[in-house]
Image (cartoon, rainbow, N blue to C red):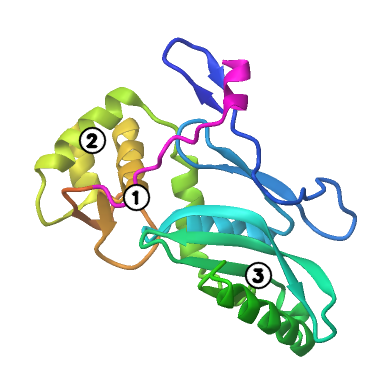
Amino acid sequence: MQILPNGDIRLPAISIADCDVPLASKGHFSGHVVIGGGAGRITQTESHLEMNGILCLHYRPDVREVREQVRFDWFDENGEVFSHYFDCVAVHQDGTKTAFAFKAARFATPKFLRKLGIIRAQAVALKVIDDVRVVTEQDLDPTEVHNAWLLHGMRHPDPEADARAAEVVGVARGTTRLDELSGEIGLGARGKRALFRLIAAGRLQQAELGRLSPEIRVICSAAPANDPVPLEDPATDAAA
């Protein structure tokens, strides 16, 4: 949801998944998360691992777009055709596409991996994707998950604070601490939140590993690497 300057509300765009994920399930977690610039777009997930993984991908500077539940039709050794749904496909800044399968380690069996290998070979041969990655709960970095959720919580714009933060960062050079930049902005917590949004946009980059905090050192970049682009969908204007 986005609150416009005139007070109107703009709802997120509908999901572009090729199949819907049931919201109610007795056997596992399922849910929705809104990602993207502006009002954002609803993204469906069918596990907590998948939600964390998609959010981490969304805030990686080398990723331009994330699409969930992407259908690919493949055939087995008998020529029978089946539909497979990649949990998500990440489109990178250079245009390459990586499909992801988020799977609990106990379910990433040799049988599953052999089947996915066949699907990968066909999808790559048809240039639908460039690679497939299997991600288990052991592969996600807890620090990256923490940082992704923190940036996600700071995503809503504050025009005054954002303009002031962009001005301060625009003349800054080299490496500095976030709290030093916040002091120059002079808007307290609003300034700190604006700086986190600049990290999400790529205008600020971490100069050291670790959880994001006011004390972390960052590198100021002259040009944004990952500015969120407002998603356009006629359906989002219905409630505006």
- Furthest residue to the front? 79
Task: Give the CA separation, mark 2 to mark 3.
Answer: 38 Å
Is residue 236 magenta-colored?
yes
Q: Which one is in front, 62 or 168?
A: 62
Residue type, label 2: Ala
Residue 215 at x, y percent in the picture: 28, 54
Dot 1 falls on a residue whose secondary structure is loop
Indicate the amino acid at tag 1.
Asn
Front label number (1 vs 2): 1
Task: Tell me the magenta residue range.
Answer: 224-240
Front position in the image: 34 or 91: 91
Give the mark toward the camera: 2 or 3: 3
Numbered badge on residue 36: none
Q: Foreground residue, 82 or 7? A: 82
Residue 100 placement (x, y as % from top left): 60, 68
Q: CA distance from mark 3 to mark 1?
A: 24 Å
Task: Label 3, secondary structure: give it.
Answer: strand
Q: Which mark is residue 165?
A: 2
**Image position of 185 (left or right of 196):** left
Q: Quadrant of residue 114?
A: bottom right
| The magenta stretch spans residue 168 | no
Q: From where the camera sits, is residue 22 visible?
A: yes
**For residue 226, which numbered disc appears in the image?**
1
> What numbered label is drawn on residue 101?
3
Q: Looking at the image, tell me whether mark 3 or mark 1 is earlier in sequence order.
A: 3
